[in-house]
Amino acid sequence: MEKRRVAPWGTLGIGALLLAGLGAGAAPVMAAPGQVSAASIGFTLPAERVFSPADQARVDRIEQEMAPVHDFTKRLDQISARFLGTPYQADTLIGSADTPEKLVVRFEGVDCYTFIDQVRALALGHDRRGFLEALVGTRYRGGHVAYLDRRHFLTDWVAYAPNNARDITSDLSSGVRVTHKILNQRKDGGVYIRGLSPHARDIAYLPPEALTPEVAAKIHTGDVIGIYTALDGLDVTHTGLAIWKDHTLYFRNASSLKANRKVVDTELGSYIQGKPGILVLRMIEGE
């Protein structure tokens, strides 16, 4: 059996801030008892949304072409691959403390967060309405399309229903570290998201030196990778998907780096060199 390889370390700068979104063949993870997934809930879709005819046609085409593929992991891999080369574009969502939230679907440009939530919604949905319902459940707590219910932090995917994923970071290695954070609380006493109360959360992360080949082998294609940050009030500063190709683990992400400015595959081991560590979330397919 050929061994999978973790890429040799290199140096890359930090990716797009999560705030811009403010802002191999494993069995799919099903919702555990007590968990509620987007796939198991039918949401009332907002009448007001941004969803161009071109993007509607793209959703229809993707869902039709992916219809023969039933394995959730393969759907995540193949659908996310369709976004490779898509330009990086920040601030595509509409909504703030002063502006009503709109449900936005936009494929011509994505940031690190809209990339993964739209990919998940496409993988869960099997038609246009299914995609929209899955997007609402993925992007918003309780499926309520409102700015303060948007999942502004990656660990909101785990903390709030419907659950998008479960955090498997602590299962990967004895080298995992855990830190206590007050999310949304800036060091200067202010907040990142106006109107959202700061809230305590323990964050587990895997430091780069702990990502051995044996540990990497526990990470599956389609797992969500968050780049942990030591900054007060934040859990991650960038996110993307784990992808195994040719026995090497890649980080598929909407990169804001000047050299990229698009969705790219980067060897994960190289990418995290010089960074504090990573979170790994395994998406929940549904019931």
Image (cartoon, rainbow, N blue to C red):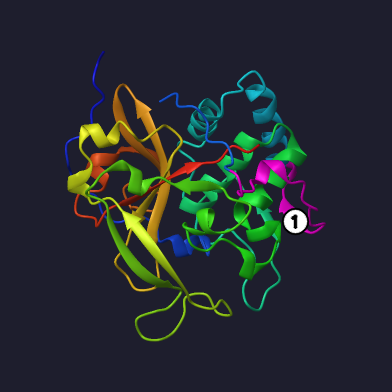
Q: Is residue 115 left or right of residue 201?
A: right
Q: Which residue lies at the image location 39% right of the left edge and 79% below the top edge? A: 186
Residue 102, percent from left and from top: 70, 62
Residue 254 visible in the picture: no
Q: Quadrant of residue 2?
A: top left
Residue 64, percent from left and from top: 70, 25
**Nearer to the camera, 177 or 51:** 177
Q: Residue furthest top?
A: 1
Q: Quadrant of the C terminus?
A: top right
Q: Which residue lies at the image location 54% right of the left edge and 78% below the top edge? A: 197
Q: Measured along the vertical axis of the image, is residue 31 above or below residue 61?
A: below
Residue 241 visible in the picture: yes
**Nearer to the camera, 30 or 231:** 30
Q: Secondary structure at mark 1?
A: strand
**Nearer to the camera, 177 or 39:** 177
Q: Measured along the vertical axis of the image, is residue 23 above or below residue 73?
A: below
Q: Is residue 280 left or right of residue 50?
A: left
Q: Which residue lies at the image location 65% right of the left edge and 22% below the top edge? A: 65
Q: Is residue 49 magenta?
A: yes
Q: Which residues are magenta?
A: 33-53
Q: Residue furthest front?
A: 33
Residue 159, percent from left and from top: 53, 58
- Residue type at numbered disc 1: Arg
Q: Measured along the vertical axis of the image, is residue 169 above or below residue 151?
A: above
Q: Quadrant of the N terminus?
A: top left
Q: Which residue lies at the image location 77% right of the left edge and 46% below the top edge? A: 42
Q: Which residue carries the number 1 mark?
A: 49
**Nearer to the camera, 228 or 53:** 228
Residue 261, percent from left and from top: 40, 49
